[in-house]
Image: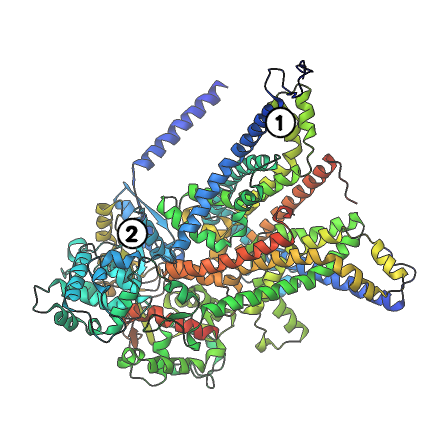
Amino acid sequence: MRKINNINNNQEILTTADGVPLKASLNRALRRERNISLLLVTPLFVFVLIAFLFPIADMLFLSVDNKIVVEKLPRTVPLLADWDETGTVLPDEQIYKALVQDINAGTVDKTILRLGRRLNFEQGGMSSLFRRSVRKLKRLKEPESYKAATIRIHRKWGDLATWRLIKRLSGKFTPTYFYSAVDGGVDKAGHFVRNPENQRIYLKLFVRTILLSLLITLFTIILGYPISYLLATLPTKLSNLLMILVLLPFWTSLLVRTTSWITLLQREGVINDLLVWIGVVDNAHRLTMIHNQIGTIVAMTHILLPFMVLPLFSVMKTIPPNYMRAARSMGATQFRAFLRIYLPNTVPGIGAGCILVFILSIGYYITPSLVGGTSGTFISNLIAYHVQGSLNWGLGAALGTMLLMFVLALYVLYDKVVGLDNIKLG
Amino acid sequence: MAKLPPYTTPAGYTWHYAYLVICGLIFMFLIFPLMVIMPLSFNASPYFTFTPEMLSLDPTGYSLRWYQDFFTNPNWQGAVKNSFIIAIFSTLISTFLGTLAALGLSRPNFPFRTTIMGILISPMIVPLIISAAGMYFFYSRINLQGTFTGVILAHAILATPFVLIAVTATLVGFDRNLTRSAASLGAAPMRVFFRIIVPLITPGVISGALFAFVTSFDEVVVILFVGSYRQRTIPWQMFSGIREQISPTILAVASILTVISICFLTCIELLRRRNEKHRGIRTT
Amino acid sequence: MYKIIKQTLLAMIVVSFTAGIALAKTKLVIVSWGGAYTTSQQKAYHDPYMKLNPNIQIINDDSAAAGPAKLRAMSKAGNVTWDLLDAVASDSIALCDEGLVEEVDHDAILAPAPDGTPASADFGDLIVSPCFVPTIVYATTFGYRKDAFATPPTTIADVFDLKKFPGGRTLEKKPIGNFEWALIADGVDPDKVYEVLATPEGVDRAFKKLDTIKDSVIWWSTGSEPVKNLVAGQVVIGSAYNGRLFNAIAAEKQPLAMMWDWQYFDLDGWVIPKGSPHLKEIKKYLRFAADTQRLADQAKYISYGPARKSSAPLVGKHAELGVDMKPHMPTNPINAKHRLVKNYEFWADHEVEYTEKFLAWVVK
């Protein structure tokens, strides 16, 4: 700044000691600051991107991925493009010949049967159709009519439904996993139709997951509100002590808490023993409180209660006790003062707690699978089943995508209500 | 709440005490399940309930056999060892990366701060089953499924948001003028960092690390997918134990874990107080 | 001080030396079900084999429950680390279909029976897939509480009879088995069960029969649950794996008994993952571990029937309990008077479809 020597000059340029204009220097400094900031964040960002977000995206992609049909039937699929799947005429000889060639090519590395399994997810019987055809088709040597010979090998090759299925699934991508995930399929014309009532399962489970989560959220409010209020209004020393009772379950392993509830709730468990001992319940008619919805609701309410108490407590802590006193002094009853003054002030805490508990609860897997039995399982349990059990990865991924979308929407809501920046621990 | 105001009506008194009783019951609900397993873990017979001998305080009704089983059974001992190995390494990784990122994000004028923050804490947001399935496929592909490296990386990912949030919290409202004035007084950037920033964030880093440790130590969904028997951790073993041959050893383990979490809780509480004192905030 | 350093160095050398030996061993990763089952394999197969072949080290991986899924994921990544996988027959067929496991020439790889009968004839029709080396026959059968009834249940119809046999039931949360039992209990000719089941009316009929007990059923999904619930008295009759029931009855002396009527036969055995790092060694292992004596030996440790015909006469007493195992084998003629053999082809086609229907029915 010492270089303001040209006083006559109207355009004074502030420069630093080495003659660089101050503005440029400042910009450079800011840029350097920012680069350092970016540099600090980059390692974690890259880590999360590669080892977390990419795998998830990759997995979710399975829900539409369908290249197996084109891959295994490279000759048949292009020819099928000209075949009218809405008509009543079977594909022509050429297509049957292509099919035989494709299947025989796929028999070499035995991968053709994968296609049978894939198609079997859509239509029962496809798996054995391929398995039975493979051996016999290999022995087929230049028949007069490929069509007749193939149909002789298995009558399903003469079934329009088989061909419709193949044609419908000949694209590289498919919406069928999502159809299945909402309990639907396609009709002959390829339009989406819902499954008959007695075969609907996934949407029902979604609804149940949501309802049970809402119920659990409601219970956490009912139980969390009174104790948060107590904690917020007691003198610090005492409330810190009582806070431990909330934080201890929070810090205790999920499995420990689940185990505890199994111990308490099972038929030969502590609660039933107690009830029998008191005489409320007859020994032969012990209550079934586990492996059903009761088990899930009780255990999860317990597990998630701290997530309700903590945000409620932090909001209640900020409400000056004078508000209530003022209301009372002006003649409001205790109840009225609470309803009109205190409750509205705690709404942000209730909102934050509810969304948090709801989001956590909807993705639960371990507790429902251990104490939920059949009626208390969640959608996560079914996702796990399709990933590890049935090997229908596409359907598992489709269900996962739906769950994730739902949770993300809730997070946007949480961000609007509370702000992600305000997430605090403990 | 400590003292009822003088204008309280008799109905008010009744309500007040009823309210206290309700709160007491809710606290019981919170804590009773954790406490009930402790005496049960000393059960001499292989049941999950109080035997008549236990209720009559007959010493023969009690035994340490489940603890003995825990400390001698190679399945459990392997699980303990693995739990610590996995938790320690994933804590180191997540604490390091999370702290760096928190320092970067807390600097002024960070571009797209909210978006990046959202991405970085996404492992906390995404339902575990989805993370688990995604990582399961991915780690299988790159040869990390069923390896310690795979499990450690997976746990590190899950734990970073906690470190990030804990460290960021210590930097909220941090007066940048402190570093500026230090710099203007001639302190080199490194010196500024170690003399001003480090003391400030230390409690956050430690509590973040504790959170990270507990996250890994408790985690069971992801390890069920990404891990295999060789990486079995305590929760893994507990989960398969509850589903398979359920034995009261699980109660013994649960009791030990509860005691450990009491220790953790104490650490965190002490840290929190220290942090508040350090920053001149006093709890009222 | 010097001494300490010297000792430390010495110890380090010894440690690295033994580690070196351990490294030099060929490690075979064998994936099985864990628990008592892996223990029985360890004692009957692995331990004797390692004793004969000191350069081989067998590592147990207990993730067979997720075996097919993990193998498929590994194989998709072109990165198979398993050498041998224990799989139930239906999974072995599926894995074979998908080309994830090796086809085996049974007579070339496996030892013939002591009398010279080739392996393929000794296993007979239990070789349900060209990739499959069967080891055990297990049954899903019924267990009941002895203290619950004056006259014990004897037929499958009794399971569905809540009037004569009141109390909770437990069944597996799967259509497989339950459908067949429901139809037989409803009077369908056991030989025609699968024909009936292939029609929508047959499925409805099965559901209708199951409806009669649905409210009393606790559905299980892991092998330990039914026995746990029987022992706890939560249910009085339930389907369970015969090995688990045997363990509860013979080892734990629980007041349970078995009802073998229309026990459901299924198989379990080995498949070799394609891309196994030690194909040659694992075939050598199979020649030993799936021979007549070894299969018979396994029955000493767990109550499952050996898959070879030639093993049956060699089954002896339980290694620890001293109980003669023959009467507890599902393959024992008295127990196997009425038996259902799982129709793998049928279920390969219909499992997906029927499971969905079944689950929808369960949650309804």
Residue visible at 49% across and 59% down in the picture: A403
Q: Quadrant of residue C351?
A: bottom left
Q: Position of residue B265 (x, y in %)?
A: 65, 46
Q: For the residues labelled 1 and 2, say whether their Cβ atoms are less than 8 Å apart.
A: no
Q: Residues within 10 Å of mark 1 (few under 14, many from 20)?
A: some
Q: Which residue is mark 1?
A: B193
Residue lying at the far right of the rendered structure: B6
Q: Position of residue A3 (x, y in %)?
A: 66, 14
Is A174 on the left-hand or right-hand side of A318?
left
Amino acid marked by disc 2: Leu
Q: Which mark is residue A341?
A: none
Residue visible at 47% across and 20% down in the picture: C3
Q: Position of residue B263 (x, y in %)?
A: 64, 44
Q: Which residue is mark 2?
A: C84
Residue visible at 44% across and 24% down in the picture: C7
Q: Nearer the viewer, residue B247 or C334?
A: B247
Separation (CA) of disc 1 from disc 2: 55 Å
Is A299 on the left-hand or right-hand side of C266?
right
Is A4 on the left-hand or right-hand side of A256?
right
Q: Secondary structure at mark 1?
A: helix
Q: Residues within 10 Å of mark 2 (few under 14, many from 20)?
A: many
The chain letter for the residue carrying disc 2 is C
- In the picture, the quarter occupied by the N terminus of chain A is top right
The chain letter for the residue carrying disc 1 is B
Residue lying at the far top of the rendered structure: A5
Relative height, residue B205 to residue A230 (above, below):
above
